C-alpha cells in the first residue's frame, strides 16, 4: 500500500492533495494507495473534510524501511519523516522551490511546477480521468486552490490556478465568494488552540545567518482575535523554539481581507530582520506589512539580516 503524504504541519493543500492523489492511484491506476498525515490538520482543512464527508487520514509519526511513498506539497527533507531515506520514494508532486537533499533508491517521477497549489498540478496530471472523480475529489481540489491563493488574492496565483478553480466551481455548482467565506471563517476560528499550537499550526523551517527559524503564518479574516493574544503568543515563542530546535520563531498574522500581515516582534533580532527584510521601522512589539500575504513568495525570499 502506497502512502501519500505532505509536510509536517498539514494545511488544506497538504491534507487534500494526499487524498486526491491516493484516489487517483487507487481508483484510476489501480495501484492501492492511502493518504496519511504527519500531524493534525488546521481548522480550515478539518472543515474541508467535514464539508465533503471525508474521514480524516491516519496520522503517522515516521515511515519504515520498505514503505512505498509519494510526497506531495513539499520536497524539503526538514518537513518529511525522519526515516524517509530508508523508505522507497516513488514520486514527488510539488509547487515549492527545489530544496534538495532527498535521495531515492531508484529513478522517480518528479513534478514541480510554478503554480499556487499542488491540487492545480494534480488537476493537470489527472486530465480527462477527472471526469470519473467523485464530487469530493473536485471539492477538495477547489478548496485547496482557494486556500493557497487566498481566493486569488495571493501573488502566487496564476491565471491557470484561477481557471482551474472556476472550472471546478462550475462543475460543482459552487459560488466561489460564498464558499471561500465559509472556508476562511473556519480557518479564523482558533479559539480552541493553545498559543504554542498556533505558533506551530502553519510553520516552515528556515535558516538565516546561521540561526534556525520557525517561520509561521496564521491566515485569518479576524486578525484582531490573534493580535489580542499577542503578549501570550510572544511569551510562548522561546519555549516553542527550544522544544523544536529553533533559535527564533517569526509569526506573521495574515489579514486575508485587507491583504496585509502583522509580524510579532519579541526581541531585537526579529526587529533587525523586519527592518532589513521589509524596510520598516520597528518601535513596538509588532509591525504591519502592507501587501504581504504569501510566505512562499513575499516572506521567505525577503528574509535577510
Image (tube, rainbow, N blue to C red):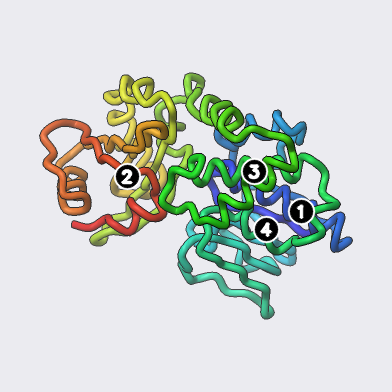
Residue drawn at 79 percent across, 40 percent down: 135
Q: Residues within 10 Å of mark 4 (few under 14, many from 20)?
A: many
Q: Nearer the viewer, mark 1 or mark 3?
A: 3
Looking at marks 2 and 4 on the same chain, the residue that comes earlier in the sequence is marked by 4
Residue drawn at 67 percent across, 68 percent down: 91
Q: Position of residue 103 (x, y in %)?
A: 57, 74
Q: Which residue is mark 4?
A: 122
Q: Is residue 281 above or below residue 82?
A: above
Residue drawn at 19 percent across, 31 percent down: 285
Residues under labels 2 and 3: Cα distance? Answer: 23 Å
Looking at marks 2 and 1 on the same chain, the residue that comes earlier in the sequence is marked by 1
**Corner quadrant of residue 112:** bottom right
Q: Which residue is mark 2?
A: 292
Looking at marks 1 and 3 on the same chain, the residue that comes earlier in the sequence is marked by 1
Residues under labels 1 and 4: Cα distance? Answer: 11 Å
Q: Nearer the viewer, mark 4 or mark 3?
A: 3
**Which numbered tag is attached to residue 22?**
1
| Quadrant of the snapshot with the C terminus | bottom left
Residues under labels 2 and 4: Cα distance? Answer: 27 Å
Q: Which residue is mark 3?
A: 142
Amino acid at each position: 500500500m502506497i502512502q501519500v503524504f505532505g509536510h509536517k504541519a498539514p494545511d488544506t493543500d497538504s491534507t487534500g492533495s494526499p487524498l486526491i492523489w491516493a484516489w487517483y492511484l487507487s481508483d484510476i491506476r489501480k495501484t492501492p494507495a492511502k493518504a496519511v498525515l504527519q500531524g493534525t490538520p488546521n481548522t480550515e482543512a478539518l472543515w474541508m473534510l467535514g464539508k465533503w464527508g471525508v474521514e480524516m487520514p491516519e496520522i503517522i509519526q515516521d515511515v519504515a524501511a520498505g514503505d512505498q511513498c509519494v510526497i506531495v506539497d513539499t520536497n524539503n527533507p526538514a518537513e518529511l519523516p525522519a526515516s524517509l531515506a530508508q523508505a522507497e520514494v516513488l514520486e514527488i508532486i510539488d509547487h515549492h522551490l527545489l530544496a534538495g537533499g532527498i535521495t531515492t533508491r531508484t529513478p522517480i517521477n518528479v513534478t514541480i511546477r510554478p503554480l499556487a497549489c499542488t491540487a492545480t498540478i494534480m488537476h493537470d496530471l489527472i486530465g480527462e480521468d477527472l471526469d470519473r472523480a467523485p464530487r469530493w475529489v473536485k471539492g477538495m481540489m477547489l478548496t485547496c486552490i482557494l486556500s493557497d491563493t487566498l481566493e486569488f488574492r495571493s501573488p502566487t496565483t496564476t491565471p491557470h490556478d484561477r481557471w482551474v478553480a472556476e472550472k471546478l466551481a462550475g462543475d460543482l455548482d459552487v459560488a466561489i465568494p460564498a464558499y471561500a467565506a465559509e472556508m476562511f471563517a473556519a480557518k479564523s476560528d482558533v479559539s480552541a488552540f493553545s498559543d504554542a499550537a498556533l505558533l506551530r499550526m502553519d510553520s516552515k523551517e528556515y535558516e538565516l545567518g546561521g540561526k534556525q527559524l520557525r517561520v509561521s503564518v496564521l491566515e485569518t479574516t479576524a486578525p484582531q482575535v490573534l493580535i489580542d493574544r499577542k503578549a501570550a503568543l510572544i511569551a510562548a515563542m522561546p519555549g516553542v523554539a527550544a522544544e523544536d530546535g529553533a533559535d527564533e520563531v517569526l509569526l506573521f498574522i495574515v489579514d486575508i481581507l485587507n491583504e496585509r500581515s502583522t509580524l510579532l516582534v519579541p526581541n531585537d533580532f526579529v526587529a533587525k530582520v523586519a527592518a532589513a527584510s521589509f524596510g520598516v521601522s520597528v518601535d513596538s512589539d509588532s509591525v504591519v506589512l502592507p501587501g504581504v500575504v504569501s510566505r512562499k513568495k513575499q516572506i521567505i525570499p525577503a528574509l535577510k539580516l
